[in-house]
Image: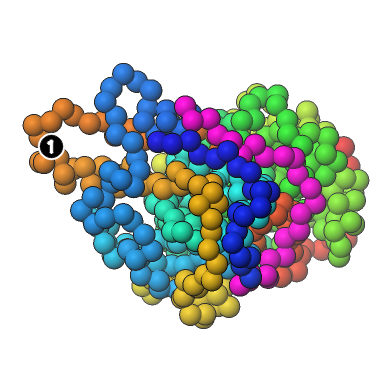
Amino acid sequence: MSAIFDIELQDAGLLQRDETSEDDSSDVIEIGAEECDAVLDVNEIVNSYCGSDAVETVAICEHNVNRDCGRLGPQDFELCKVIGKGGYGKVFQVRKKTGNDRGTLFAMKVLRKASIIRNQKDTAHTKAERNILESVKHPFIVDLKYAFQTGHKLYLILEYMCGGELFRHLNDEGIFLEDTARFYLCEIILALEHLHLQGIIYRDLKPENILLDAEGHIKLTDFGLCKEHIQEGAVTHTFCGTIEYMAPEILTRSGHGKAVDWWSLGSLMYDMLTGAPPFTSDNRKKTIDKILRGKLILPQYLTPDARDLVRKLLKRQVAQRLGSGPLDGEQVKIHRFFKHIIWEDVISRKLEPPFRPKLTSEDDVSQFDKKFTASAPIDSPVEYTLSESANRVFQGFTYIAPSILEDVYTQQSYLTAMSPPQVIRARSPRKAMRGFSPRTTHFHLHNTHLQTHRHNGVSHGNIEDAEMIEIG
């Protein structure tokens, strides 16, 4: 496998003609970010694909997989519905037309290369999301099934989460009961804990990035703002996230680590129980000021355990914040708000979801925004030509999930019965880069680092009849 990525995107000639964006509706703005290293080590790539043990291995790539039906491409998927749009492309509900999984529904995220390669950070972000989705496998993290590309576009094929965003259900309900919030928090905690164990900070936890499956269990999506290689004690300085859920240390650029995810969890918990994040205002500057200096208002209808957990998650001093120490998520899990939770049952998906999506068929898209689903499912043609050097930037993008590979090789095993055995290894957990995210989409698409968010609904509960505390 050749080296990916000595990227010099500022060179002239990367694009032979500029592409006019077909969707400039993104409401995301860039405030500034640290430089991304867009050069990946060749040995890391080879080892992660082929394994490093002294055994015969087969690399996961387009040339030795799906040999019966040729190279996988857009022609293998039927476009059913549009379920999201963003600055770089669209997200479709698609049905597989070929292979052992023909007839299966997926979510297909389509990204225009020309839009991505104009900015070196965006290029690194795009490859980051693909790499994180490949390397991180967990019951509460959305699963990447395929990745491939054409001369003009990138395609990520993800499991289809028919229940839509938690954001939609929270807006419909206004607020959640504590038992309902506890269910979602439990599954989110395990997902965050797993990411942290891989050295990844999520950095964009919010209701829009939490998807529901047909049974009502959650999965995190959109890994565009993740930061990898963050081990215990390490910090990064990128200013990124969704303001209402951003930790103070991100806003002050004082350096942040995995504890920012626990602050976001506290903000999300408050949002679910009260109808809005804890610190909001009518403009960005005031919201930031409230996050940095405002008092935390806790409605009296919250139980003592819920109030205590929110307080401890929303500590401005990182060292005092629940989950900030070496125990990470374990410290959160033993809080008395979760005293009746059996965590083995959570990871086994044995808890009964409080909400089960009402679906009339397997391809029902009623849980997604009608402004997307009502539009024609067309993978828009492109009118530009990428240079050869530009296309080399995305070399190595192709991916096929190990579970799918196992089916392929099982069917082909009779052809190689007399040959030495071949070992197919799922890639070991590997750090990735950052990708992208916009609101009100299924699998979000964005091209910058700062995102604002407001609930459409109003906050519930009498603010005057509330506890106001310093969260220092």
Residue 133, x across and y down, in percent:
49, 45
Q: Residue at x 38, y 63 (%)?
A: 74
Magenta-drawn stretch, dominant element (helix, strand or loop):
loop
Residue 12, x across and y down, in percent:
66, 52
From what the image shows, is residue 361 above or below residue 109? below
| Image quadrant in which the N terminus is located | top left
- In-image side of 244 versus 419 (left or right): right
From what the image shows, is residue 93 above or below residue 49? below
Q: Is residue 39 magenta?
A: yes
Which of the 4 image quarters holds residue 102? Answer: bottom left
Q: How is the image coloured?
A: rainbow
- In-image side of 455 versus 215 (left or right): right
User: Is residue 50 something one can see in this rendering?
Assistant: yes
Residue 460, x across and y down, in percent:
75, 65
Secondary structure of the residue carrying numbered label 1? helix
50 vs 231, nearest the viewer: 50
> Residue under circle 1?
416
User: Is residue 304 something one can see in this rendering?
Assistant: no
Query: Residue type at mark 1?
Result: Thr
Q: Residue at x 36, y 35 (%)?
A: 426
- For mark 1, does the 10 Å Cα neighbourhood hold few (<14), some (14 to 19), or many (20 or more) residues? few
- Extent of the magenta region: 21-43
